[in-house]
Amino acid sequence: MNKFLWSIFALLPALHCCGQDAAFISHSAAICNYSLNSNDVWSSTCNPAGLSEVKKFSCGLFYYNQFLMKEVSSQYLACAFPFNKNISGGITLFRFGNNDFSKNKISVGAGLRLTNHLQLGAQLHYEYVHQSEQNSLHYACPELGMTYRISNKLSIASSIFNFTSNLYNNHKLEENQLLRIGLSYYFDDKVKVHAQVIFENKNYPFVAVGIDYLPKEKIYVGINISSTNQPFNIGVGYKLKPLEIKIAFAYHQLLGVSPASAIML
């Protein structure tokens, strides 16, 4: 069993995007789509510019049971809060793994609403990787984000992660950089389509497409397709004021189905 677990950990470079978490949560598994145009507490997981739209204190809890194995599960705790009508901040805690091997990250960011069309954001990530009692790794890196609303229906966005090749690194970790470029189109209040291209150094770029569908005011359905080895995700959600609950399933072509659940307040 231990050998199998370590073989899973050896796959981490393929399952994680540059310290951002697996492609399934590259935006946020809690939202279950691949949009760079999120404007809520989960903006910190992909594009901090979206934090500028947070107008009241909110928090979110997220649990992702990768491959139905507790040992390689992921947990999120995210909070967002406004400073004034144009600036909001966010703090996100992330953990992956178990007591033998784990990745632990804290992210602190802020978003600025510069105009009615333009949002900017910045974020600092600090990650601690526990490999054993004698060996641990640390690194810190920044992230910048931007969202521009071209019209009421069309928005573009981008974010760049670790553009400094790590501000701090106590070990020879891979200094990955990540660039995301996204486009969102709102057909109406019920249907939204998102497309995203993700460029990572030392790897081929991949494409992700997501559809958000609101059949009723309180019900959400999300479908995502990507060119990664985890190509298909589907999620459903229900708003039970003041809570929003979402459940999602991600399919991996080798390791099967992984469930995720999230609660946002």
Image: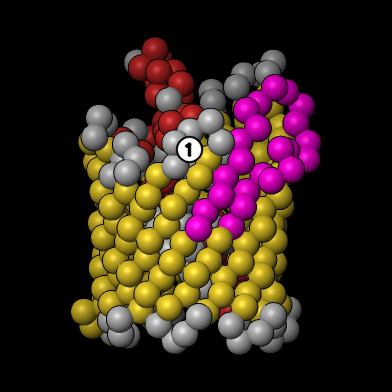
* Segment colored magenta: 159-181
Residue 53 position by quadrant: bottom right
The quarter of the picture where residue 112 lies is: bottom right
Q: Residue at x 32, y 61 (%)?
A: 210
Majority secondary structure in the magenta region:
loop
Q: Position of residue 123 (x, y in %)?
A: 69, 57
Decide whether residue 187 is among the magenta residues: no
**Left or right: where 5 falls relative to 219:** right
For the point 47% across and 75% down, the residue is 155
Compared across the picture, whether 86 is left or right of 59 comes to: right
- Residue matched to label 1: 16
**Is disc 1 placed on a helix, strand or loop?**
loop
Of residues 154 and 108, the one nearer the viewer is 154
Query: Which corner quadrant holds the N terminus?
Result: top left
Q: Residue 257: x and y, percent? A: 24, 41
Residue 173 x, y percent position in the rendering: 65, 26
The colour style of the image is secondary structure
- Does residue 247 show up? no
7 relative to 50, above or below: above
Residue 174 in sight: yes
Query: Residue 147: horizontal and vertical position, in percent?
Result: 57, 71
Q: Nearer the viewer, residue 99 or 108?
A: 108
Q: Disc count in the image?
A: 1
Badge 1: residue crowd in 10 Å (few <14, some 14–19, many ≥20) = some
Kind of residue at badge 1: His
Horizontal placement of 239 versus 253: left or right? right
Residue lying at 33% horizontally and 69% vertically, measured from the top left: 193
Q: What residue sits 39% from the left and 12% below the top?
A: 3
Relative to 123, is 134 above or below? Answer: above
Q: Is residue 169 magenta?
A: yes
Quadrant in the picture for residue 6 = top left
